[in-house]
Image: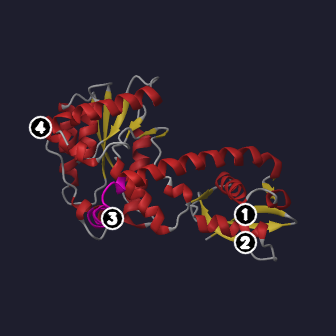
Amino acid sequence: MDRQGSVAQLRRAISEFAQSYTSDADRWCVGLSGGPDSLALTAVAAGLRPTTALIVDHGLQADSASVAENAQAQALSLGCCAANVLRVQVAGEGGPEAAARTARYAALEAHRDGPVLLAHTLDDQAETVLLGLGRGSGARSLAGMRPYDPPWCRPLLGVRRAVTHAACTELGLTPWQDPHNVDRRFTRARLRGEVLPLLEDVLGGGVAEALARTATALREDTDFIDTVAADALPSVSTGAGLEAAGLAVLAAPVRRRVIRGWLLAGGAVGLTDKQIRAVDTLVTAWRGQGGVAVGSRLPGQRLFAGRRDGVLVLRQQPI
């Protein structure tokens, strides 16, 4: 790869993204960790529009405060109009990686003053697809991250990680190297350092690009089925429930998508493909069975999807 072209490649990717998705925004934010991906993104973005850097300090490492302060100083030196350190507490279900992600996105949402650029690369997309595949999470998970999911913007999803690293070298920047990225306790770190390199070797290269293409194709299919499901929803809705007889005549992928949307609208969170299919059996294999428990947005509560008098219904129950 020609390192001298790395900054130009990033500038082109971000400019094309902005023209397609954020042409009406006169300023934006960027999520900056201090690592090479987000540092390169910040450097280029700040030269295109007024940019506020948002640096989330998760407090998970002894030197996290100094890492955040250094990233703040770098952002200002790169031309950001502001650079704010956001300190969060990481707690919750799903393990440290999921809890940190939840805290990070909440902080970015609360402090943003425009669209938020995130530095996910094509390599991150490939890792996400592999994670979804290994967990059997269904097509929605395999579809990976969306380039534009307002307010989240991922202009580098088509760019390899090597380009952002080379851009930092070209610009004379010294990025922070997160030790968690090589810590074998974390699943994504092992995918990055062990699994993907092995697949590249066994399959002769091009695996990351192929996984990213798979995500794009599945996302297009998923979006289409979502549209069909949204059109079908009014015909099976009855008050706050869903009519089982009407659901039964829908194609299975559409029916499950209708059920998913209904659960989310009713306050469900953290839905899995297994849970949605379990609710689906209340329509397709009804034998008087009990309800299906799913997570609830309300603290200390859980939701149960059940069937009563031919209608799927939701009820809250204290944990």
Give the amino acid at mark 1: Arg
Q: Which residue corresponds to mark 4?
A: 172
- The image's mark for residue 315 is 1
Badge 4 density bin: few <14, some 14–19, many ≥20, Cα 10 Å: few
**SS category of the residue bearing label 1:** strand
Q: Distance between the residues labelled 2 and 4?
A: 59 Å
- Secondary structure beneath dot 2 equals loop
Q: Position of residue 11 (x, y in %)?
A: 29, 30
Say which quadrant the N terminus sits in: top left
Badge 1: how crowded within 10 Å, few (<14), some, or many (20+)? few
Determine crowd level at label 3: few under 14, some 14-19, many 20+ residues with C-alpha closer than 10 A. some
Up the image or down, 37 lies above or below 198; here it is: above
Q: Residue 280, position in %: x, y?
A: 72, 65
| Mark 1 or 4, nearer chain start | 4
| Disc 4, SS | loop
Is residue 248 something that shows in the picture?
Answer: yes
Residues at marks 2 and 3, CA–CA distance in whole angstroms:
41 Å
Tell me how far mark 2 sits from mark 1, CA to CA.
10 Å
Foreground label between 2 and 1: 2
Residue 49 sits in quarter: top left
Which quarter of the rendering shows the C terminus? Answer: bottom right
Residue drawn at the location 24% of the way across and 39% of the way down: 40
- Say which label, 2 or 3, has the lower sequence index: 3
- Is tag 2's residue or tag 4's residue first in the polypeptide sequence? 4
Q: Distance between the Cα atoms at labels 1 and 4?
A: 58 Å
Element type at mark 3: helix
Q: Give the range drawn in magenta.
A: 193-208
The answer to whether the residues at label 2 and label 4 have Cβ atoms under 8 Å apart is no
Q: Which amino acid does label 4 sit on?
A: Gly
Which is in the foreground here, disc 1 or disc 4? 4
Callout 2 touching callout 1 (CB < 8 Å)? yes
